Image (spheres, helix red, strand yellow):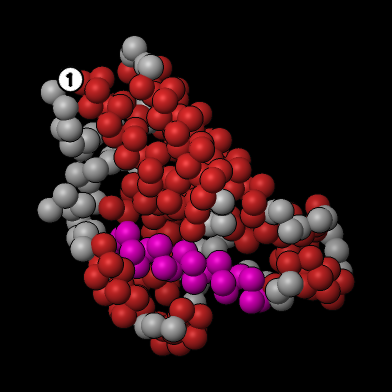
Amino acid sequence: MSLKKEMSYREFINREHSLSHAPYSPEFAFYFAIKSGNLYEVKKLCEEESFTEKSGLGQLSEDLLRNMKYHLVITAAMVARFCIEGGMSHEMAYSLSDYYILKADKCKSADQLSRIHKDMSLHYTQKMKAIRKSQVCSKPISKCIDYIYNNLHKKITVTELAHETNLNSSYLSRLFKKETGSTIRSYIKKQKIETAKNMLKYSEYSSSQIASFLAFPTQSYFCEVFKKEVGLTPKQYQDHCYGETGIKKSNPFS
């Protein structure tokens, strides 16, 4: 795995430099980090740039504070949608959304609004992390899952996971299957395909680039696995997503 490939994947997962009128990939990489329960990345993104200081925000009101409140409502709605896709109940997702929107409505300053945005983002992420691990009983398997999510840009082996957990490979494989209902290999493949789906939806990367970023040996193998898991080729899936939303990835308001 070259440094260039790893950085390209990390750019997709980590960057969130603007909202609304900016390219979709930074915005949705942030939502994907929340959906994945990646607390470390969400904290990092929130600390790197204040919500109210983001560049590229569209003007929804002439009043600056009201404009930011409207953008927070949009963000809350999108976060709720992504978390529902990730397994959160509709009731929980919308209850959290309503709670933070009501708090935002009472804000008197941009600083207060930024704190609410950060609190909301971390709250959803913590809930998604708990959901992700809800069927996992042991610390070794929780550690495996964290390692997998943080290293999707690499070829992950059972030997690596065994080393991370200080367990025998065979025992770890049996324990993983018992607690998750999936083999380690199948679980890794599923998470890579889920990430590929998000990259196809919300970035300009090609199938060949995504295959390389996610450490598939060849583009043809990636397409084969993707079609088997999703029922569509990567191109068909991308076209289908565009057909559903009617939104161009380069400009959500065009």
216 above or below 39? below
Q: Residue at x 34, y 35 (%)?
A: 73
Q: Is residue 188 magenta?
A: yes
Q: x%, y% of residue 139?
A: 81, 52
7 above or below 125? below
173, 6: nearer the viewer: 173
Q: Residue at x 37, y 27 (%)?
A: 50
- Mark 1 residue crowding within 10 angstroms, few (<14) / some (14–19) / many (20+): few
Q: Is residue 228 left or right of residue 25?
A: right
Q: x%, y% of residue 141?
A: 77, 59
Q: x%, y% of residue 250?
A: 20, 56
Q: Quadrant of residue 219?
A: bottom left
Residue 2 seen from this side: no
Q: Quadrant of residue 61?
A: top left
Q: How many marks can you see?
A: 1
Residue 242 seen from this side: yes
Q: Residue at x 51, y 36 (%)?
A: 96
Q: Residue at x 40, y 30 (%)?
A: 101
Q: x%, y% of residue 25?
A: 32, 54
List the residue tagged with mark 1: 63
Q: Is residue 211 magenta?
A: no
108 above or below 89? above
145, 67: nearer the viewer: 67
Dot 1: element: loop
Q: Residue furthest front?
A: 91
Q: In the image, which residues are magenta?
A: 185-205
- The type of residue carrying mark 1 is Asp
Main secondary-structure element of the magenta-colored stretch: helix
